[in-house]
Image (cartoon, helix red, strand yellow):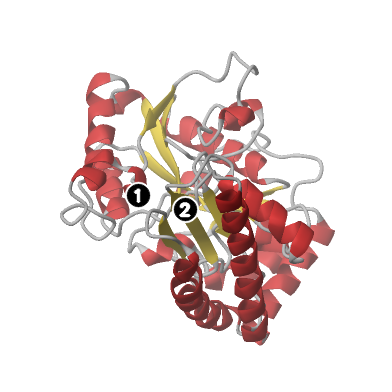
Amino acid sequence: MLDLIGKLKPVMPSTQFDSFFFWNSGAEAVEAAIKLARHATKKQNLIVFQGGYHGRTVGTMSLTTSKTIYRGRFGPLMPGVHVAPFPYCFTCPVHRAVPQKHNVINCCDNPIEQVELLLKQQTTPDETAAVIVETILGEGGYVPPPKSFFPKLREICTKNNILLIVDEVQCGFGRTGKMFAIEHFGIMPDILVMAKAIASGFPLSCIVSSKELMDTQPPGSMGGTYSGNAVSCAAAIATLEVFEEEKILENVNNRSSQLFSLLNSRVKSLLPPHIGLDIRGLGLMVGLEFTGVPHGFVASVAKAGVENHDIILLTTGIYETLRLIPPLTVTADEINDGVERLSQAIDMTLKKLEKDGNI
């Protein structure tokens, strides 16, 4: 564990992140972040964002709003959780009304205004411990926020003495072309949550913060039998060595440019004029959201992909969205091959719908 900390410190997005706590899963790490925030601030309430996914334990599913499947009929859930809208520009009514004026480049700032309203109408700053947010929505649709969102959210948190917790369980560790996705937005949170790719599939998760904040925890208040186990820590060390030796971040950025170029040229050309497509994401965390298609369209594309074109595709969110998450080691030839198989699956699905009179 100590060797791993020595490897992690140089890749942290800020020198303020110098104190680590390890656990096994993403949900456990999110719970640790909540415990730290509540204990350190002596406040109880939390603000989360619509479409966010933070886990499936009782605590973390109380924070999760990406789909009802994760929380339905498990109540009563943890109290003190307040939900604000995430800046999901493609579905935003303001964007749809005036798309040329307000979009992901020039956000209407309604989500920021709604956070400010929450602090005036539902949970006062004096009782709000933290704001917790995925840097990029994962299960909620692979949605990166506008560049202006995080600086304004950081300003609100600092002004009101509220901790900012960033959940990078899915988008961290190189997935977006930087080690951590928050590095794209020019601000730092108070607590950073990571898991999944940290140990290449071995059970390991982590929160990192400043020693000043972490030292508010009494010894024994957080921990677990298997947390930071030696085998997973060794896997995490090996993962970081591969990042350096194989220039993973460089590969992610090169393959990302290639992938977006192919999607814009190849996939868009398949679609009839009445079908819309939003291609979005950062690095190799890419979402394809279709409009003007019947419900279940992307599920049909995924089915066609695995059954007829030997490609595994995943859907995400409540809208018609595919997520593309190739390995960070993916090659140029594999990107070309994958986009061709994806295109064939989409084309097959469109032709079937047309034949059946459903499109």
Image quadrant assignment for residue 201: bottom right
- Residue 130 rendering spot, x and y as whole percentages: 41, 36
Q: What residue type is labelled 1?
A: Phe
Image-based side of 122 in relation to 228, left or right: left
Seen at 31% across and 56% down, the residue is: 146
User: Residue 17 shows which numbered tag?
Assistant: none
- 165 or 177: nearer the eye? 177
User: Which residue occupies the extreme right position in the image?
Assistant: 231
- Residue 357 rendering spot, x and y as whole percentages: 55, 45
- State the separation of the CA atoms marked 2 and 1: 9 Å
- Element on which disc 1 rests: helix
Q: Name the residue under label 2.
A: 289
- 277 or 94: nearer the eye? 277
User: Which residue occupies the extreme top position in the image?
Assistant: 76
In the rendered image of this protein, does residue 45 appear above or below residue 285?
above
Seen at 75% across and 47% down, the residue is: 227
- 275 or 98: nearer the eye? 275
- 117 or 207: nearer the eye? 117
Residue 245 visible here: yes
Residue 1 visible here: no
In the rendered image of this protein, does residue 54 appear above or below residue 81?
below
Number of numbered labels in the structure image? 2
In the rendered image of this protein, does residue 62 appear above or below residue 199?
above
Q: Earlier in the sequence, mark 2 or mark 1?
A: 1
- Element on which disc 2 rests: strand
Contact (CB < 8 A) between labels 2 and 1?
Answer: yes
User: Residue 90 shows which numbered tag?
Assistant: 1
Q: In which quarter of the image is the N terminus?
A: bottom right
Q: Residues within 10 Å of mark 2 (few under 14, many from 20)?
A: many
Seen at 77% across and 52% down, the residue is: 203
Q: Which amino acid does label 2 sit on?
A: Glu
